[in-house]
Amino acid sequence: MTDSIDEPTLLEQLKQLTDGLYWMSESDYPFKVFRWEDKAQADLDTEAVLRRTGHSADTPVTVVDLDKFFHRATQEEKWHSDEEREDVRRYRELLEMLKQYFSDIQVYRIGEVKIDVYVVGRSPAGNLVGLSTQVVET
């Protein structure tokens, strides 16, 4: 993680990188950038994520490795169109940025069938920052 960028700039860069980028599943959903202030810099666990996202405590949660989550999106295939190759390039750039500027990154998949996804890491300022999207899996 590198801390040579201020948080407002970091948030703006995340917004630019994800603008027009959709996570593909049975339905395609855009990314939203979020910031959770965390003055106490408490450890983030599934209970805290459920609370911060307004989900009930009994909602199923799966924690996924960042690289595993983005694997499919960052792999270029021979059959990809130019537009799909550009999306792969953008996903690679996004993944690189997340790794460069955030620590303790986790991907939380919350729910079943219509799944809320939160990619959460700690910014250089100590706040929890990330991306949210949805996945549909029937």
Image (cartoon, helix red, strand yellow):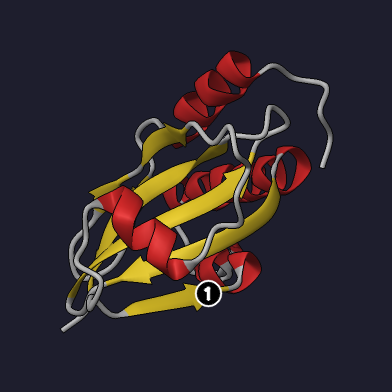
Q: Quadrant of the N terminus?
A: top right
- Which residue is rendered at x = 68% and y = 27% of the image? 125
- Which residue is rendered at x = 45% and y = 36% of the image? 36
Q: Is residue 31 left or right of residue 67?
A: left
Q: Quadrant of the C terminus?
A: bottom left
Tell me where residue 13 sits by quadrant.
Answer: top right
Q: Provide the secondary structure element on which disc 1 rests.
A: strand
Q: Is residue 40 left or right of residue 17?
A: right
Mark 1: give few (<14), some (14-19) or many (20+) Cα within 10 Å.
some
Farthest-out residue, front: 40
On screen, 82 above or below 44?
above
Labels in figure, total = 1
Whether residue 3 is visible: yes
- Which residue is rendered at x = 60% and y = 50% of the image? 42
* Depth check, front residue: 54 or 8: 54
Tell me where residue 118 sits by quadrant.
Answer: bottom left
Q: Position of residue 92 (x, y in %)?
A: 64, 50
* Depth check, front residue: 97 or 26: 97
Farthest-out residue, bottom: 138
Whether residue 73 is visible: no
- Which residue is rendered at x = 64% and y = 67% of the image? 67
Q: Which residue is mark 1?
A: 64
Q: Position of residue 2 (x, y in %)?
A: 84, 34
Q: Position of residue 119 (x, y in %)?
A: 49, 54
Q: Is residue 138 left or right of residue 42?
A: left
Q: Amino acid at mark 1?
A: Val
Q: Position of residue 11 (x, y in %)?
A: 53, 24
Q: Is residue 73 left or right of residue 98?
A: left
On screen, 21 above or below 78?
above
